Image: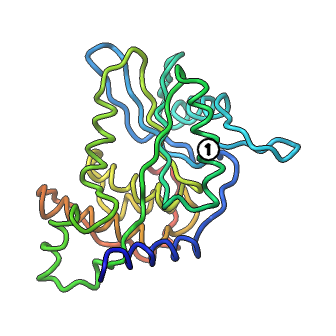
Amino acid sequence: MNNKILILIIVFINLLNFVKSSDLSYKKVHLVDSIELANGNTNYFFRGNQPTQTLSNGTKIFPYDELVEFLRNSSLSEFGVKLPEQFYIIDIKLITGPLPSELPDLELEQNFFAANPTLGESCTNQTWGDLIDPQLVPQDKLEEYASTISSWSADKLPQRMRDYHNILLTERELPTVLYVHCECGCDRTGEVMASYVMKFKGWDLPKALEWDFAIAGRDINFSNRWSAQWYCLYLNYVENYKIDCNQPTPPPKSLISINNF
């Protein structure tokens, strides 16, 4: 199928499944990884949802202080990790297009960091998911498809995971907090975070997706699940990971407490 047609179909599916963002949610903010550096700093990787706050008059703002509070409290309560007094935030928003409904939130982030460059920076990553269900691909074609996902999958997860990890390995004057999110912090974020913990934390696909389901409180979009599964198969066939790449069953009913992770 023509790649442009695939992208149009994915956009349509995302519009049908789009979850309008709510304000920044503490239950969506979680420490994913941290790396100690030679210069004495530690860099941190968090997942979350859209960092906005709606004031009583209906105006939306970028709630920097609230985000920092959530980062501190979440890492401390879940892992006993105390964040440093000062850190530099790299805020990456996962977008699809972006969708028109995402533009106001995106502008809030960009405008805040443009006005406060010492606090951090804002950028975007296109995140579409995939429309090819790995479970329907003939077994003799799985390795071929998985080995070449960088050429046909729009999300380029092998390179994306290396890029995120390289951010954590980079020494800066201040410790870095990498904060990656979409609107809900569920589907696109779920795809990317499942991929990261499979690559760098030794998780298999069922555990990674069950973690996503627990944070979202539901199954995540099928296109994002399939993309994470293709990346799992890539790790298996190309990077020789001994990893379970089967979808957990049944996804919507296997919700477990995030405290189990």
Please determine whether, in this image, residue 223 is positioned above or below residue 172.
below
Q: Is residue 62 above or below residue 40?
A: below
Q: Quadrant of the N terminus?
A: bottom left
Query: In the picture, residue 3 is in which quadrant?
Result: bottom left
Q: Residue at x 30, y 80 (%)?
A: 2
Q: Nearer the viewer, residue 147 or 79?
A: 147
Image spot of residue 6 (x, y percent): 37, 77
Residue at horizontal 47 percent and vertical 27 percent from the top: 81
Q: Nearer the viewer, residue 230 or 92?
A: 92
Image: 19 above or below 103: below
The picture places residue 241, in percent across and down from the top left corner, at: 16, 56
Image coords of residue 173 (percent x, y): 39, 14
Q: Which residue is mark 1?
A: 107
Query: Where residue 93 sits in the image (x, y, percent)?
Result: 50, 47
Extreme residue toward the right, this view: 57
Q: How is the image coloured?
A: rainbow
Residue at 31% across, 67% down: 229
The tally of labels here is 1
Q: Residues within 10 Å of mark 1 (few under 14, many from 20)?
A: few
Q: Amino acid at mark 1?
A: Glu
Q: Secondary structure at mark 1?
A: helix
Q: Is residue 235 left or right of residue 19?
A: left
Looking at the picture, does residue 137 appear above or below residue 177? below
**Residue at point 58% right, 49% down?**
49
